[in-house]
Image (spheres, rainbow, N blue to C red):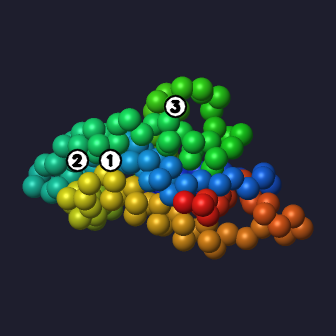
């Protein structure tokens, strides 16, 4: 789930664009601002399919609210990560807060669209496991996962060194 939030932009179709550098903090901020949307969508989809005592049913909304509060104020940095990773596929929205809202809705919608309800109890357990973490730690986990993905990316065949497929990104070296 965290990987999906950090690199949801990798779902884009592969074409070539120039390499974009994204800081670990920008990725963490994107994860921190997008995670509440995912938690909310998962809670809405799964609430009726989990036991009443499961974490998701009992505390999913509270987790969403806490993560949303902790991620507030990070929209400008998150938008930079989204724009760098998605490039021209980002909806033409200039306001950072609005861009995060649109992308949060899109990413969470994609996450739950094919989510089998049979997975809801396991997902509830996953959310319970990360629930004690501050949003910053969840963001740092996502940034680390994105760093691993970025390190494993290669330039597309026949393209100049440094060229990346759309949706690929590089973690800035000067952090």
Q: How crowded is mark 2: few (under 14 residues within 10 Å), some or many (20 or more)?
A: many
* Residue 11 appears in the rendering: no
- Check whether the beta carbons of the residues at disc 1 and disc 2 lie within 8 A of each other: yes
In-image side of 33 versus 17 (left or right): left
Name which residue lies at 49% across and 28% down: 98
Q: Mark 3 or mark 1, which has the lower sequence index?
A: 1
Which tag is nearer the camera, tag 1 or tag 2? 2
Residue 63 image label: 2
The C terminus lies in quadrant: bottom right
Query: Where is residue 73 drawn, in percent x and y?
Result: 38, 35
| Residue in the foreground of this view, choosing between 55 and 16 | 16
In-image side of 84 versus 157 (left or right): left
Seen from this angle, which residue lies furthest left? 53
Residue pointed to by mark 1: 39
Q: Mark 1 or mark 2, which has the lower sequence index?
A: 1
Measured along the vertical axis of the image, is residue 3 above or below residue 104?
Answer: below
Name the element at disc 1. helix
Query: Where is residue 22 drawn, in percent x and y?
Result: 59, 53
Which tag is nearer the camera, tag 3 or tag 1? 3
- Check whether the beta carbons of the residues at disc 3 and disc 1 lie within 8 A of each other: no
Residue 84 image label: none
| Residue in the foreground of this view, choosing between 170 and 9 | 170
Which tag is nearer the camera, tag 3 or tag 2? 3
Name which residue lies at 50% across and 42% down: 77
Residue 162, quarter of picture: bottom right
* Residue 22 appears in the rendering: yes
| Residue in the foreground of this view, choosing between 99 and 161 | 161
Residue pointed to by mark 3: 96
């Amino acid at each position: 789930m965290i990987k999906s939030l950090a690199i949801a932009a990798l779902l884009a179709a592969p074409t070539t664009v120039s390499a974009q550098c994204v800081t670990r903090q920008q990725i963490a901020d994107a994860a921190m601002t997008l995670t509440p949307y995912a938690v909310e969508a998962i809670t809405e989809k799964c609430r009726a399919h989990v036991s009443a005592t499961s974490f998701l049913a009992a505390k999913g909304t509270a987790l969403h609210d806490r993560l949303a509060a902790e991620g507030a104020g990070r929209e400008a940095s998150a938008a930079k990560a989204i724009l760098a990773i998605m490039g021209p596929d980002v909806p033409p929205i200039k306001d950072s807060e609005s861009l995060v809202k649109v992308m949060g809705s899109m990413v969470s919608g994609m996450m739950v669209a094919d989510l089998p309800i049979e997975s809801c109890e396991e997902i509830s357990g996953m959310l319970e496991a990360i629930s004690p973490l501050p949003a910053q730690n969840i963001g740092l986990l996502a940034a680390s996962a994105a760093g691993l993905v970025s390190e494993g990316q290669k330039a597309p065949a026949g393209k100049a060194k440094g060229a990346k497929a759309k949706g690929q990104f590089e973690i800035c070296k000067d952090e």
